[in-house]
Every structure is written in C-alpha cells, then in structure tokens.
Amino acid sequence: MKRIIITICLLFLGGWLLPSACSASLVDDLQAQINQKEQEIKQLEAQAAQYQKDLQGTQSQKNTLNNQLATIASRIKALQGEISVTTSKISATSLKIESLGLDIDLKQDEIDKKRKEISDLIQVLAEHDRESLMEIILTQDNLSDFINQIHYMESVQESIQTNITELQSIKKEMETQKTSAEIQKNQLAVLRNQLTGQKSIVDSEKQEKNYLLTQTKGQEKQYQVLLNDTLRKQQEVEQQIFDLEDKIKASIDPNSIEARPGALSWPMEGILTQSYGYTAFSKKMYSSGFHNGIDIATKYGTPIKAARGGKILAIGNCGKYAYGKWVMVEHDNKLTTLYGHMSSYGAFKAGDEVNRGDVIGYEGSTGYSTGAHVHFGVYTSESVQIQKVWYGTVPIGAHLDPQKYLQ
C-alpha cells in the first residue's frame, strides 16, 4: 500500500506540478500584458474622444474651402485615433485568446490526471474485490490489520468519489473557458473587419481632399461655384426621388404592413436628429419638404448594424447626391431597410445573409448630407426598386415611418 501511495505522489509531483507551474507562469505573463494593453486602450480612447470633440468644432464652422479641408483633416485625425484604439483592442483580444488557450490546456491536463487517478483507484478496488472476506481475514496478522485494511478500502472509495466530483467541476470550468475563447475569437473577427473599415474611410477622406483641390485649384471662388452647383443638383435629385416614391406609394395599400414595435432594432446608438415626414428641417432643406426616413447621429465612423436578420439586397453609391454610399437589407417580415450616407461599407456583399446586429457599414456624411449621421429608411419589400441613374444607383420604394417598427 505504501509503495502505491509513493508512486502516485511521485507521478503527481513530477508529471503535473512542474508543467502546470510553467503554464501558470505563462498565463500570469499574458495577463500582465493584457492589463497593460487595457490601460493603453483607455488612454487611446480618451485621446480619440478629444479628436472627435475637435472634429465637431470644425464641422460647425462656415462652409468654406479652408474649413472643409480642415474638417477632412480633423476626420482623418479622429479616424487614426480610432484605428489606434482598434489595433490595441485586437492585440488585447489576441492575448486573451492565447491565455484562454493555455488555461484550457491546463484544465485538460488536470482532467487527464484525474482520470488516471480514478482508473488507478478503481484497479485497487477491483483487486480487493477479487478476494473473499475469508481470504482477507486470513492474510492479515491480526484483527487490527484487518480493520485498517477495511478503512483503507473505504478511503479509496471516498477518493474515487472526490476525484469524480473534482473531474466534473474541472470539465465545467473548461467548457466555460472554451465558450469564452469562442466569444473572443468572434470579437477578434469583428475588430479586424472594423479596422479594415476604418482604414477604408481614411482612404475615402484622402480621395475627397484630392478631389476638392483638383476641382477648385485651391481657390475659394471655385469652391463656392462647385458647392452651389452641387447643392442645386442635390435638390433636383431629391425632388425626383420624392416624385417617384410618391407614385409608388399611391399604388400600395398603406395597411398591408402592420406597424409592429420591436420588429426592427436601432441600427446605431445616437441622437435622433430628424424624424420621418414633414419636419422643420426637411421643409428648409428639401424641395419636396418631406423626409422619407429618420436620421441618427453620433461620432463619425461609428459601426452601423443590420436592424434585423435578412439578405443584403443591394449596395450602391449615389456619389454626392441622395444617400451617398448606401446598403439595403431585405427581411423576412415584408420589410426592407435602407442605411444611407455611409463613409464605408462593411464586409458583406450583395446576396449575403446577415444577422440582426451585424456591422454592414460605418456612419459618414456622403451624398446629400450636412453632417455625419445614418439615414435609416423602411420600405415595403414588394415596392423596392434599384434604379441606375446618371449619378450612380438609387433605391426607391413605398417608405414607412421607421419609428413605428423600432424597439
């Protein structure tokens, strides 16, 4: 019996504690790196918030060439700050995944050791069970040895039960860690897509700067001519869209789609800056006086999410007119949603299936827009048309009040 106990102890100390101690040390090192990255993220987020504040101040200035160029420069600076934050989050998430991987390996080692211990103890019991009570009594020198043998076998049974309980607990912990690892891996994929989107926005802003300088040759007078010409065309385009949608809407039964609050989620957290219908702002800005969706505003470049699961019906670009860069998602409830004025698209393409909450683009100010926001429109799916026009592709259809379907 002593020999068995000594052997088990040696195996325990030599085969488990030393490798486990090494792995535990690695986990501690990784945790220290994670803590350092999280502190770095906090500092970068504070810096990025200041850049966003500077951008808001720049955007509120008079629309001149110099101010527009300054706004673009502020946007690029703010986006580069967000890129730094995202890059650090990617590093921190990668470290967390590595740490969880080591934890899972440690737990697997524990499981293997526990299984071996249980197997050895069961073997001891099996050997004992092969002897009859009379044989056990006869092999003992005295009654005291017999009683000790009985107590020993009882302790073996208790050890088996204890090991089984511990094994179940370790398995549960490992499953929790595996779930956490999967969550972190999904988050890593989201962050990498976000980084790609942010870099794409920076490229777009640089292209816009080059366009302005090329078209105006750096002259304020030329910029104002370009601005006024663009504004005139934007209003013409807006009126054309209104006329087309008015005809479509007249042919659709307005009661065919029941208003269901909660059928859709908000595509982005932020401030509702304009409602649906004839608003004070739309009466001043649009020749039709009507706003066919709602506007939600927050910091430039914020991810825009699908309001419900469905299929990417179309992705388009109206250039400097209408919705600018836009995405349409067709849902299973006879509704189709529009997301306009994006600075950049997400990782999906037309025809892809998306889930509620998937990132399909990033907030911007493309098209007919006076500031960063997302234009969110809701249409009856049967009425939607994607038309090719001189300024790109534009979605039209029988629009509904989005707020009647939002949570």
Image: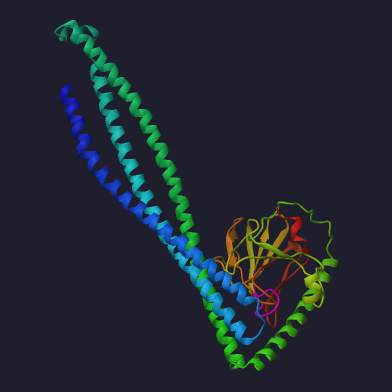
Q: Is residue 50 magenta?
A: no
Is residue 135 among what the camera can see? Answer: no
Q: How many marks overall? A: 0
Residue 272, picture quadrant: bottom right
Relative to 183, 231 lies left or right: right
Residue at x 51%, y 67% (from the top left corner): 48
Quadrant in which the N terminus is drawn = top left
Residue range in magenta is 317-326
Establish if 11 lies above or below 132.
Answer: below
Instruction: Where is residue 186? Give x, y as percent.
Output: 48, 55
Q: Main secondary structure of the magenta part?
A: loop
Establish if 103 lies above or below 256.
Answer: above
Near-viewer residue (16 or 75): 75
Instruction: Where is residue 312? Give x, y as percent.
Output: 62, 64
Relative to 3, 28 lies left or right: right
Establish if 89 lies above or below 57.
Answer: above
Residue at x 35%, y 24% (from the top left corner): 161
Residue 106, picture quadrant: top left
Instruction: Where is residue 5? Give x, y as percent.
Output: 19, 26
Q: Is residue 318 magenta?
A: yes
